[in-house]
Amino acid sequence: MSDEYVDVFTCVKCRNPRITKSARVVKNNAIIIGKCLKGHPFNLKLPMEQEHKWIGHLRDSVYKCRCGMPLEEHKIKVGKKKTQLVLKCTKHKQVTMIDTLLWNTISADREVQKTLEQGYKPEPYKVGKEPKKYEKDTAKTKKKETTEPRKWQPY
């Protein structure tokens, strides 16, 4: 996550985190609508070419309840254009609509976060052994044993 978009997902009036109610893609921008924890509404217009910088903040905003507790997935309906998320905390149930394009990126980002939290460290790239140089001994072929030369015979 880039720190460039931290303030965008923080309420300007009360400095509480913003909770996403819906997110859609229009042309080259993502339109995000929701409220902060105190109820101040917001509309964000974020450029899709910088999606890698703000998608983590959007993910956190989607998975935070209006009471401030983290939300867990209850039911997900993935459609061609829109995805409906039914998320629950211990007290509340929240329904969020997201464009499937954004949802695919968020779900992939969540999988990466889960593997990082579990302590998975990818193995470093290992340089393989150099191939052996061509040697005559490696490609030995057996010679056919010839007993006598063959004579030409007519059919």
Image (tube, grey):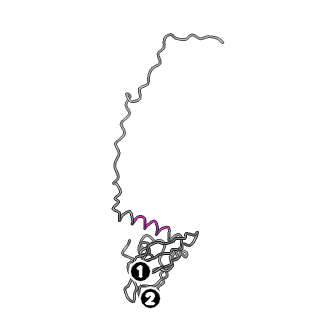
> Horizontal placement of 77 versus 60: left or right?
right
Secondary structure, magenta segment, majority class: helix
In the image, residue 31 above or below residue 139: below
> Horizontal placement of 97 versus 40: left or right?
right
Q: Can you give x and y, in whole percent of width and height, for residue 87 in the image?
A: 47, 75
Per the image, label 2 sits on a secondary structure element best described as loop
Q: Can you give x and y, in whole percent of width and height, for residue 140 in the image?
A: 41, 26
Magenta extent? 104-113
Q: Residue at x 36, y 37 (%)?
A: 132
Q: Amino acid at mark 2?
A: His
In the image, residue 81 above or below residue 155: below
Per the image, label 1 sits on a secondary structure element best described as helix
* Image mark for residue 110: none
User: Is residue 3 shown in magenta?
Assistant: no
User: Which residue is more in the foreground, 29 or 115?
Assistant: 115
How many numbered callouts? 2
Residue topped by disc 1: 9
Residue topped by disc 2: 40
Q: Residue at x 38, y 78 (%)?
A: 6
Q: Residue at x 38, y 72 (%)?
A: 2
User: Is residue 107 shown in magenta?
Assistant: yes
User: Which residue is more in the foreground, 133 or 18?
Assistant: 18
User: Which residue is more in the foreground, 143 or 72?
Assistant: 72
Separation of marks 1 and 2 at Cα, in angstroms: 12 Å
